């Protein structure tokens, strides 16, 4: 149980385009999902917390107009990187919190974004 | 003080030895703790959670929590080369978010 999927697993795009990443909890309902970014050899950085049916809460320094988050259902959250630039190239990972269970976070497999 | 601190390593142990990974936390972190393993290029995988003072064992892994010292550790017995990874310690920050330490890189030498 507690499986989280992400799609796509990797994406290459041109500078200035937008990219959407999907995060799904497959076997549990997740009222809260989290979006992280990780640069090579660095730790996870929380970007935003996404609650189903409400606006996401962004961490300090994360541009909400650039990283659009939608959490329309209990099993799906999306992150859209708008007008992507090479400095946005990173490993984007979502996680979902099983509020019914033991309060743990389960991570998706991640999406590697490369902006040319 | 950072909320969750870890020695970045690398920590090198021979195959078959016990690997000991340590984590300290500040008052801003509540007392629910989690250990994740992250292989290079992959996302973190939950290994253990611990909520109460003392030890919790699961197979070759033992998590230890000492609330008085604000210290949580992970012991890996009979370390294998496949255990080589970065181990992340995380705690709740009294809300719904996790606070992650920077991770300790473990290398198990055959």
Image (cartoon, grey):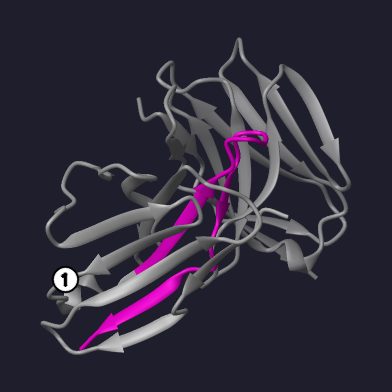
Locate the N terminus of chain A and report the quarter of the image it occupies. bottom right
| Residue B75 position by quadrant | top right
- Does residue A45 appear to the left or right of B99 in the view shown? left
Q: Is residue A14 above or below residue A51?
A: below
Question: Residue at coordinates 46% horizontally, 23% vertically from top-left?
Answer: B29
Measuring from the top left, give residue B60's x and y in whole percent. 86, 48
Chain for numbered disc 1: A
Question: Residue at coordinates 81% horizontally, 47% vertically from top-left?
Answer: B18
Q: Say if the magenta span includes residue A106.
A: yes
Q: Is residue B109 visible?
A: no
| Secondary structure at numbered mark 1 | loop
- Does residue B99 appear to the left or right of B62 in the view shown? left
- Does residue A111 appear to the left or right of A79 in the view shown? right
Locate the C terminus of chain A and report the quarter of the image it occupies. bottom left
Identify which residue, B65 or A67, lies in the foreground.
A67
* Residue that extends furthest to the top in the rendered view of this protein: B68
Question: Residue at coordinates 27% horizontally, 45% vertically from top-left?
Answer: A56
| Residue B81 position by quadrant | bottom right
Q: Is residue A17 above or below residue B36?
A: below
Measuring from the top left, give residue A54's x and y in whole percent. 29, 42
- Does residue A2 appear to the left or right of B4 in the view shown? right
Measuring from the top left, give residue A83's x and y in whole percent. 12, 75
Count of numbered labels shown in the rendering: 1
Q: Say if the magenta span includes residue A110.
A: yes
Measuring from the top left, give residue B8's x and y in whole percent. 49, 49
Q: Which residue is mark 1?
A: A82
């Amino acid at each position: 149980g507690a499986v989280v999927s992400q799609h796509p697993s990797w994406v290459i795009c041109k500078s200035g385009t937008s990219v959407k990443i999907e995060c799904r909890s497959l076997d549990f309902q997740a009222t809260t999902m989290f979006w992280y970014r990780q640069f090579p050899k660095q730790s996870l950085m929380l970007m935003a917390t996404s609650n189903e049916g409400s606006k996401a809460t962004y961490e300090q320094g994360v541009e909400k107009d650039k990283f659009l988050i939608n959490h329309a259902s209990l099993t799906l959250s999306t992150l859209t990187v708008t007008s992507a630039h090479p400095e946005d190239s990173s490993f984007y990972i979502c996680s979902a919190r099983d509020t019914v269970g033991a309060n743990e976070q389960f991570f998706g497999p991640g999406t590697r974004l490369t902006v040319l | 003080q950072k909320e969750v601190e870890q020695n970045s390593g690398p920590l090198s142990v021979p195959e078959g030895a016990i690997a000991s990974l340590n984590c300290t936390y500040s008052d801003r972190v509540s007392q629910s703790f989690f250990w994740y393993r992250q292989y290079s290029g992959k996302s973190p995988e939950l290994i253990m959670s611990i909520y109460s003072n003392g030890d919790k064992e699961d197979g070759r892994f033992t998590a230890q929590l000492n609330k008085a010292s604000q210290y949580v550790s992970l012991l890996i017995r009979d370390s294998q080369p496949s255990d080589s990874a970065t181990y992340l310690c995380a705690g709740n920050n009294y809300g719904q978010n996790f606070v992650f330490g920077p991770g300790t890189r473990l290398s198990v030498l055959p």
